[in-house]
């Protein structure tokens, strides 16, 4: 589109001004921003959305803002490319350095750098060769992590109770699976509807696999015993969702055995390598999931017939063995003849033996009666009584002698005790001094401190109050008696009596 200059007032023509000057003064004046905006509108109106093929160059991963910046180049030119954060998360094919891609986007300019660029809306590898190269590279990386190791494979249950299917609910795949299950062995089927191609298909498939694994085995919705991930045939681009890393990792994490049935027999995706079994077609997956019910019934009938035949043969063999044993056993008469003969012999010896035994006892009884008649029981009893009386006098005499000896010893000890007892001393005129509590007092100083004293004599006890020497001298009984009688000279104090104990 032509560039329209902004309206401006033209200067008047001057006769003295050269023509070049008049031409320069007539050119419109643009601001940098106006020119950038005009160029942007011109470029976007002229091209709009384009499909561009080139090799990714200068890609260093998403920017801190989440956007991706790189360049697309071929042998002759290069153009800057931008993938906004929201679009980058939805891209089926993520940018990768050196990858040749086909992108669709809008051509525009970036005024800050005076450059033009393409805003990418979608991206895919350029050609089958690029798809295959990307597939082989991803396969190599996942295999290096051990996700395709044979030891990770689990056995498929022989007869699952519930079967989970991850596929499109509107395609022919789910109908083929259900029909095949109905023909072979009808089982309850849970279908998790997903998109099987296009943007977001990989995330839905991975979420379905993880959703089936998250079901509670005892919950309202039963947890499947086996999973089938299925899709019909198509190009490598159509099947690419089953090559995405999210799907492969979800299948590897599944604790439920998984059968992959993606495409036809010649189609191969990465989920085929990580699944526990690979089916050539969705119908083949249904055949792997359940056995043939008619074959099972035939096998059960065959096993039942074999069991009945085995039991009958065992019974017949036991019957033949029993008949052989019966023939080998002797008849009852011959078996009891020897024992019957022994019984007869014993019966014949029993009567003489009983007679001999009675005769022996009779003779013994006669001998005892003779002995009894020669010695009367009364005489034997009198002799025994006399012996018993003689035996009874001996301990009585010994007991009297022991009592006499101990009585003499007790009297001697009693006399010794009377001689050594303090009561004997008291009977000779001495006294035992105690305090009110009955504790013996052995010194005058202790007696002077006691408020009352108990004097124990030989014939009784009296209470007394102690007085000091000064109190005794001051008492009236200590003065001279009337009549002028002289006071007797004081006797020398008697020596203190020692302790009797």
Image (cartoon, helix red, strand yellow):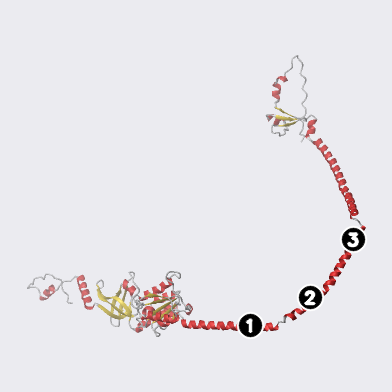
Q: Nearer the viewer, mark 2 or mark 1?
A: 2
Q: Position of residue 495 (x, y in %)?
A: 77, 29
- The reply to whether residue 365 is visible in this rendering is yes
**Badge 2 element:** helix
Residue sticking out furthest to the left: 15
Q: Quadrant of the N terminus?
A: bottom left
* Total numbered badges shown on the rendered structure: 3
Q: Which residue in the protein does label 3 denote?
A: 369
In terms of sequence position, does the residue under pointer 3 or pointer 1 come before the other? 1
Q: What residue is drawn where x is 47% and y is 83%? A: 294
In terms of image quadrants, where is residue 279?
bottom left
In terms of sequence position, does the residue under pointer 3 or pointer 2 come before the other? 2
The crowding category of the residue bearing disc 3, from other C-alpha atoms within 10 Å (few below 14, some 14 to 19, many at least 20), is few
Report the disc number at residue 343: 2
**Badge 3 element:** helix
In terms of image quadrants, where is residue 7?
bottom left
In terms of sequence position, does the residue under pointer 2 or pointer 1 come before the other? 1
User: Could you tell whether 361 is left or right of 77 in the image?
Assistant: right
Q: Position of residue 46 (x, y in %)?
A: 21, 78
Query: Gap in Å between the C-alphas at discs 3 and 1?
Result: 73 Å
Q: Which residue in the protein does label 1 denote?
A: 319
Q: Position of residue 232 (x, y in %)?
A: 37, 82
Q: Position of residue 373 (x, y in %)?
A: 91, 58
Query: Gap in Å between the C-alphas at discs 2 and 1?
Result: 37 Å
The crowding category of the residue bearing disc 1, from other C-alpha atoms within 10 Å (few below 14, some 14 to 19, many at least 20), is few
């Amino acid at each position: 589109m032509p560039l329209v200059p902004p309206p401006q007032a033209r200067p008047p023509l001057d006769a003295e001004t050269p023509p070049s000057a008049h031409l320069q003064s007539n050119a419109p004046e643009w601001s940098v921003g106006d020119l950038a905006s005009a160029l942007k509108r011109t470029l976007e109106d002229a091209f709009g959305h384009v499909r561009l093929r080139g090799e990714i160059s200068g890609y260093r991963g998403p920017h801190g803002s989440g956007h991706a910046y790189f360049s697309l180049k071929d042998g002759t030119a290069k153009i800057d490319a931008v993938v906004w954060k929201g679009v980058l998360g939805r891209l089926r094919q993520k940018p990768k350095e050196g990858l040749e891609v086909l992108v669709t986007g809008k051509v525009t300019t970036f005024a800050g750098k005076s450059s033009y660029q393409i805003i990418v809306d979608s991206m895919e590898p350029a050609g089958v060769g690029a798809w295959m190269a990307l597939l082989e590279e991803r396969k190599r990386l996942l295999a290096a992590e051990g996700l395709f190791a044979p030891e990770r494979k689990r056995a498929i249950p022989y007869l699952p109770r519930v079967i989970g299917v991850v596929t499109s609910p509107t395609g022919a795949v789910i109908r083929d699976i259900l029909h095949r299950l109905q023909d072979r062995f009808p089982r309850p089927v849970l279908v998790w509807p997903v998109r099987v191609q296009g943007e977001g298909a990989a995330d839905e498939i991975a979420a379905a696999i993880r959703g089936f694994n998250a079901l509670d085995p005892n919950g309202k919705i039963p947890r499947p015993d086996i999973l089938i991930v299925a899709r019909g045939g198509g190009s490598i681009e159509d099947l690419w969702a089953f090559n995405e890393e999210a799907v492969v990792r979800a299948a590897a994490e599944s604790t439920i055995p998984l059968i992959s049935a993606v495409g036809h027999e010649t189609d191969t995706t990465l989920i085929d390598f990580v699944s526990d079994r690979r089916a050539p077609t969705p119908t083949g997956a249904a055949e792997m999931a359940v056995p043939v019910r008619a074959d099972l019934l035939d096998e059960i009938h065959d096993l039942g017939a074999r069991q009945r035949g085995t039991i009958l043969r065992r019974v017949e063999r036991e019957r033949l063995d029993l008949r052989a044993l019966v023939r080998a056993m002797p008849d009852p008469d011959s078996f009891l003849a020897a024992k019957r003969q022994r019984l007869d012999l014993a019966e014949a010896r029993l009567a003489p033996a009983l007679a001999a035994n009675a005769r022996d006892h009779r003779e013994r009884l006669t001998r005892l009666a003779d002995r009894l008649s020669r010695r009367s029981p009364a005489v034997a009893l009198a002799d025994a009584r006399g012996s018993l009386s003689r035996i009874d006098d001996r301990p009585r005499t010994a007991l009297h002698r022991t009592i006499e000896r101990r009585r003499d010893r007790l009297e001697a000890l009693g006399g010794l005790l009377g001689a050594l007892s303090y009561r004997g001393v008291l009977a000779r005129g001495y006294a035992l001094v105690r305090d009110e509590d009955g504790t013996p007092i052995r010194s005058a100083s202790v007696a002077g401190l006691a408020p009352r004293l108990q004097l124990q004599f030989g014939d009784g006890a009296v209470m007394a109050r102690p007085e000091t020497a000064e109190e005794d001298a001051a008492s009236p009984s200590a003065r001279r008696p009337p009549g002028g009688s002289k006071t007797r000279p004081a006797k020398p104090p008697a020596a203190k009596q020692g302790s009797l104990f």
